[in-house]
Each structure stands twice: as C-alpha cells, then as structure tokens.
Amino acid sequence: MKTPKYIAVDGGEGSGKSTLIKTLPDIFGELVFTTREPGGSPDGKVIRRVLLNHPFSPMAGAEAELHLMFVDRYDHVKEVVKPKVDAGICVVTDRSDASSWAYQVNAGSNIATRGILEAKFWEYRKGLVLVPLLYVVLDVDPEVGLSRRKATNRVNHIDTRPIEFHQMVRRALLEFPNYIQSRSVIIDANRPLEDVKKDFLAVIRREIGGFS
C-alpha cells in the first residue's frame, strides 16, 4: 500500500485546475478528498470572502494577503488535510503555498518589499504541520488563461490586474519547485481541456497506486 498523498494543484487564472479537480470524486470515489485554499475549512470560508469578495479586497496589500493566506493554511492543513491523510486518503488541494509564493511574494511585491515577504513566507511555511508531497503546476499563458476567465463571466479583482502581474505569477509558479524538496509535475494547460485532463488524471492515478 502506498503512503497517503497530499497533492497541490496550482496554476494561473484560467488554467482549468478547479474544473479538473472537480472531476476527481466521480472518478476515484473515496480514495481522493478534494479541497481548496483559501476556503477549505469553515474559518477559511470567511477568509476567502474577505480576500476575494469584500469591497475593500482590491486595496489589500501583498503583506496583508500573505498573512491571511497562511492563517487560512494553518487551519486548513491542521483541521482538514492532515486528518484525511492520516486516515489513508489522498488529499488534492486547489491551490497551496505555491500560489502564495507566486501571487503575494513575487507578483504582489516590489523591490522594497520582496525580501521581507520572502523571509516571512519561508518562516510561515516552516510552521505548517504538513506540506504537499507533490505539486502539480498547470502552466498556462496569461493571455490564454484570462481570455478563458472572461468567457465564464466569473471575473474577480485578481483577474483584472495588469498582464505583467499574471506573467510574474506564471514565472514564479514554474520556479517554485526549485526551492522546495517536494516533487513537482508541470502540465501544459494551454491545450484543450480534454488533453490536459488526460495528463492530469494520469498523474493522480500514479500517485494513488494505479487506480483505473
């Protein structure tokens, strides 16, 4: 029997990660538990609303966002993720600390704050009781991803940020695996969804032991 897995799926806006993750319960049943950050725990749902839907959300700085993301993450990992992993269930999360590294530490910072946010990020990460064993990065060109988002009519204040912001997110997500010990897989998400889904499901099948 394979060691229970904690898998993170990260990607830029419009990468298709949420859509792909939603297919997992129907395919793998109780072998896989899906969740998300922020908002994977009851307290996290409140934080998610503050970060994405509050009228003042667009005015929050990267440092405030980073703090809130890790408040959510500490609670989520301790109360939701770890109990499932300890019970032998594979947990797949829609976003993780990789996204905090990309969105807040890199794309959201400037020359004056980058070093401070990097130091805080690694300090906060050390406090997590569990980190993903595998990071799946769905790599999408920002122009492709944002056009997909606009087509869904579910645009939030993050989607409307300058294209340069999203380009920095993409670069940071691709670079993040170089700084951690966990394994990583990069999937080309510029392709049609069914092609991406085929590769994504192959990764998940491999991780939970060849389920078919």
Image: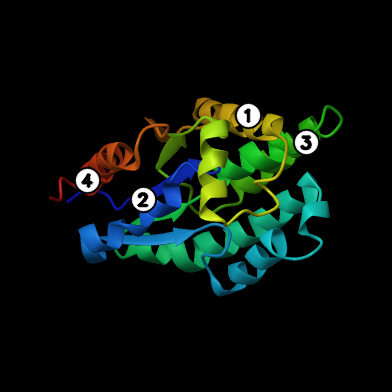
Q: Give the alpha-carbon distance from disc 4 to disc 3, as whole Å.
A: 37 Å
The three-letter code of the residue at mark 4 reads: Arg
- Secondary-structure class at tag 4: helix
**146, above or below 141, in the image:** below
The residue lying at 49 percent from left, 30 percent from top is 177
Q: Looking at the image, which is closer to me, 116 or 93?
A: 93
Give the x, y percent position of residue 13: 55, 43
Disc 3 designates what residue? 109
Q: Nearer the viewer, mark 2 or mark 3?
A: 2
The disc label shown at residue 167, or none? 1
Q: How many marks?
A: 4
Disc 2 designates what residue? 20
First in sequence: mark 3 vs mark 1: 3
First in sequence: mark 4 vs mark 3: 3
Residue 89 visible at all: no
The three-letter code of the residue at mark 2 reads: Leu
- Secondary-structure class at tag 2: helix
Q: Nearer the viewer, mark 3 or mark 1?
A: 1
Q: Nearer the viewer, mark 2 or mark 4?
A: 2
